[in-house]
Amino acid sequence: MGDVNAETVIRTVELTKRFGDVHAVEDLELDVRRGEIYAFLGRNGAGKTTTIRMMLALTRPNRGFVEILGVRMAPNAVRAFERIGSVLENAGSYGNLTVLENLEMQRDLLGLKRNHWVDEVIEMCGLAEYLKRPAGELSLGNRQRLALGRALLHKPEVLILDEPTNGLDPVGIAAIRELLRNLSAERGITVFLSSHILSEVQQLADRIGIIHQGRLIEEIGYDELRQRNRDYLELKLSDTARAAWALEEVCGMRDFAVREEDTIRIFSGFERAEEFNRALVEAGVAISSMRMSEESLEDHFMKLTGGNASQEETGSAMDAEERGKRR
Amino acid sequence: MIRAIKAEFLKVKGSKVPLWTALAVVAYGLVAIAGAFGMKATDLNETLSTAGGSWAIAAGRGWYSPTWENVLRQNVQGIAGAWGVLLFGFVTAYVFGRERKEGTDATMLTSPVHRRSFAVAKTVVVAVWVLALTLLAFLFQTAGFALAGLEGFAWGHVFGSLGETLQAAALIYLTLPLVAFFALTGKPRYLRPMLFLVVAWVLGNTVATTDYAHLYPWMMPVLIGGASWLPVPSDRLDLASWVVALGVFVFGLALTMWKIGRSNDAVAGRE
């Protein structure tokens, strides 16, 4: 998990990109901290790829800027690129070259010597059995692995990945998830990845930024991420401070959160609802409503981005498809 | 820079395009060799001397007689004509345009190597490729002519022809950075640079009839050996010609570097 006090590694300031009348990205402000896995979630066309392209200086912003590792990103930001690994959507490899040649070429370009790390990357990305195969003959999933391998060759401090699990089968998705988790936990690599599949990033990310129509509409932190998808009992109350006291002191309940001025969410011990009710009433707290939550993070995402289950291209639909495959 | 050059050469490895371009050279060579056999079997010079116009003038100079000197002129012609311009142009369009076509441009542009290095490295690859095709064309055709049992062999003719052939290839090469620039713009990737070349060549045929052919880069190679053995002046290239050709090269390379160096907006917004 990223440390909230850690140094900012990726920063965007008023980042804006327009294509004619289309506002692809609008006033985007992001702060990604060292060691964090930050997922950039949005439906297709939300502005994820454009943002990533601006981060990598492949697209010029109309306004604002991107700083990575303290370097203002611009074409030829060679010093920054030495510390960044990236995989863009539909990651291109040289199809006429074998997997090994693709990796060797990147190694040469980076001025690295052949060492055990190259072998480790090959192993990590599950490329060992494909080394002599032309990249053009690989499945989409294996091309993604190759692209990821290439991005890892120089032990980057920051990984920027655009839809890294695109085209991967469920086992491949799990493997990539595990790999990214390890890279972040063991090597302290900061990972910024985009996705339209909520369930994937939810299991992986320390923070999720939701982008919709080019705007960052919500950021969900580590704690909230883990609470969002939990069932909870939501109470609307007259006095949350007194209610918190009653829950803690009378019921011994600490797994709750004060959400707003008049709301408390209890995340466990639902079978003790009657006891909570009695304790609150005895403490002089008026309860105006009490209900079990039905909203998951996915529902929340759909609500924010205006999607619905019938839309094939929404994250939810894609997500459902992925889940279907897993079954 | 060396790393970029090494990478650019590796990118060509395993590609079928070098083979196809070599086959194109051989195919043209076969036609030229067949022509040499044809010249020997028929009295072409005699026939064309009565054809009138430029043909008769060329025949008057004995250009269609089956001699080594005449057939070696075909080596220059093969490179200098539309065939060489288009083939070398295609090589350039492939080297520069394939990255965008195959989606590897982002990989290249996010490498910790200055973008200009890639432009220069690709220009070096094109130079080597063009030189290899030129030498293949020359050697293959010359070897074929040897089989025809022509008269008047002299090493002087062979080396003279080789010099002119390389000169023609060099003049075409100097125009290729402009083709590279077009390969980096717009879609589809290879159509635009090839259209540019066709237009440049067609315009050249008009310019060739004026007094300014020696200043028009796409006609300069033709002036070295004479087009289609017709009596196009072969001594018209002067210092101004080379200055113009070098100017086109520098301008084209600068344009290509500028294009490859700026953000790649043309392919953005795909999301």
Image: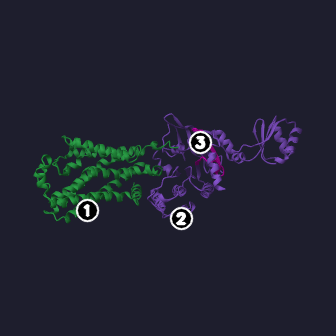
The answer to whether residue B160 of the structure is visible from this angle is no
**Disc 1 to disc 3: CB gap under 8 Å:** no
**Disc 1 to disc 2: CB gap under 8 Å:** no
Q: Nearer the viewer, mark 2 or mark 3?
A: 2
Q: Colour of chain A?
A: purple
Q: Nearer the viewer, mark 1 or mark 3?
A: 1
> Which three-letter amino acid code belongs to the residue tagged 3?
Leu
From the top left corner, tell me how far across and down residue B80 is, in percent. Answer: 24, 51
Q: Nearer the viewer, residue B44 or B79?
A: B44
- What secondary structure is found at the residue carrying circle 1? helix
Crowding at dot 1, Cα within 10 Å, few <14 / some 14-19 / many 20+, comes out as some
- Give the letter of the green chain: B
Q: Nearer the viewer, residue A157 or A322?
A: A322
Q: Disc 3 marks which residue?
A: A30
From the top left corner, tell me how far across and down residue B129 is, in percent. Answer: 33, 56
Q: Disc 1 marks which residue?
A: B140
Q: Disc 2 marks which residue?
A: A128
How many numbered circles does the render carry?
3
Image: magenta residue range:
A193-215
